[in-house]
Amino acid sequence: MTLSISKRVKGFTYLLTLVYFGSYVMRINFAAMLATIYPDIGVTKSAISVVITGLTIFYGSGQIINGILGDKIKPKYMLTVGLSLAAACNIGMFFCQTVPWMTAVWCINGFAHSMLWPPIVRLMSTYLNDAEYNYATVRLYWGSSCGTILIYTLCPLLLKIITWRWIILCYAFVGLAIVAAWVLLSPRVLKKEPSVQEESDDPQQSINIPERKEVPLPSRIWISVAMIFFAIILMGMLRDGVTNWMPSYLLESFGMPAENAIFATVILAVFSMISYSLYDALYRKVFPNEVVCAAVIFGGSAVCGVALYLINLFASSAIVSMLFMALIVSGMHGVNMMLISIVPKRFAKSGKVSTFSGLLNAGTYVGAAIATPAFALIAENYSWNINVLVWGILAAAGTAVCLAVVPLWKKFRREYSDNPEI
């Protein structure tokens, strides 16, 4: 039977989606224009990558800090402060003239964005039941894909008429408009207390009541968390590393103009947006264990990476490369959905959903911080096709790690998160 989603849940979902959309347009705009920025200021790829690395380090470490704070501070306040600070940093980037100053401002920007995801997950796990949570998760990721599509579609067009600095300033004002929308509309969608039940004939349609008593976690769960965290690092290396360097790869390997190379990256976001519903269906109907589902998706991405490497040895093609990179990146978004959106929900009984959400999401940006300079160095010292082979190897490693944690995770769900007696 098709789930009927109430107007309250829809309004709640789409407002959070707008917030997440705002986070993306103010966070990935600089990375989207890397192929234009580093020649403009006269530095190398590896030199400019420090700016992105700084953002990812502060975003990742901030996830842990703000994840813990997210279980103690009202989520709506954290979201307001995070969005406002991110907009301020985008304005500040307009005035930066050197890489050190750019790095400093973008580090603060990374920390500002780390204030957003943990409270979003906490709000969803508090106000929504399982079916509504899955509904909201897919649409939340649509927001990130729409933000990515907007960035990679408009930036090449805007670069023809204004500089990259003015483009970042424009997105800062988009962010300020979203801050205003959040401040005005959030009281309306959050006006009902989580403990208040909506009238419904179906008990599954009511607002999920959070546990009043916090149930201690089994000590052995930290083995599973550590392994999942490592898998997330691998996912972050592939998702952000491939996305950030795709324009440069297309420019240097196939002579594609910088503006067209940036625009071509839209295919990554389009594939990802389509894939969210597919991966959600794969999870609900075929592999209902999120770690098993992540292993399957990692495996598919590994096949794509190795296949592209072999194809490039004989007859490289820009179209084929874009297609396989889109499959790899969309696969990593699927892994992200499984390990960062669904896994934290399993800790609801501990009262630490925001903490685990922030902790696990930090792994993504540990991976991104490693991949951005590492892929640049591989390209400069070897070739882009060696990078492609590395992508396949990383995805294969992710498959192995997820498969190794499956028995432990099944036991945890059976004895703790899915156990009705605790």
Image: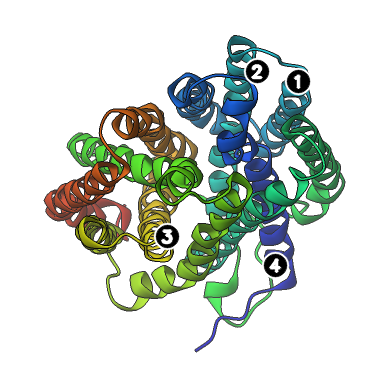
Q: Earlier in the sequence, mark 3 or mark 4?
A: 4
Q: Amino acid at mark 2?
A: Val
* Label 1 to label 2: alpha-carbon separation: 7 Å
Q: Which residue is mark 3?
A: 318
Q: Secondary structure at mark 4?
A: helix
Amino acid type at image mark 3: Ala
Asked whether 147 or 372 is in front, the reply is 372
For the residues labelled 1 and 4, the Cα–Cα distance comes to: 35 Å
Instruction: Report the front residue among 378 and 55.
Output: 378
- Residue 89: horizontal and vertical position, in percent? 72, 24
Check if mark 1's residue and mark 2's residue have beta carbons within 8 Å: yes
Task: Tell me if label 1 and label 4 are in contact, CB under 8 Å.
Answer: no
- How many angstroms separate mark 3 from mark 4 (CA)? 40 Å
Residue in the picture at 59% in, 14% down: 99
Q: Secondary structure at mark 1?
A: helix
- Residue 105 badge: 2
| Residue mark closest to the camera, 2 vs 4 | 2
**Pick the front one: 277 or 137:** 277
Which is nearer the N-term, disc 1 or disc 2? 1
Give the labeled residue for mark 4: 10
Q: Amino acid at mark 4?
A: Lys
Q: Position of residue 215 (x, y in %)?
A: 35, 41
Q: Earlier in the sequence, mark 2 or mark 4?
A: 4
Of callouts 3 and 1, the N-terminal one: 1
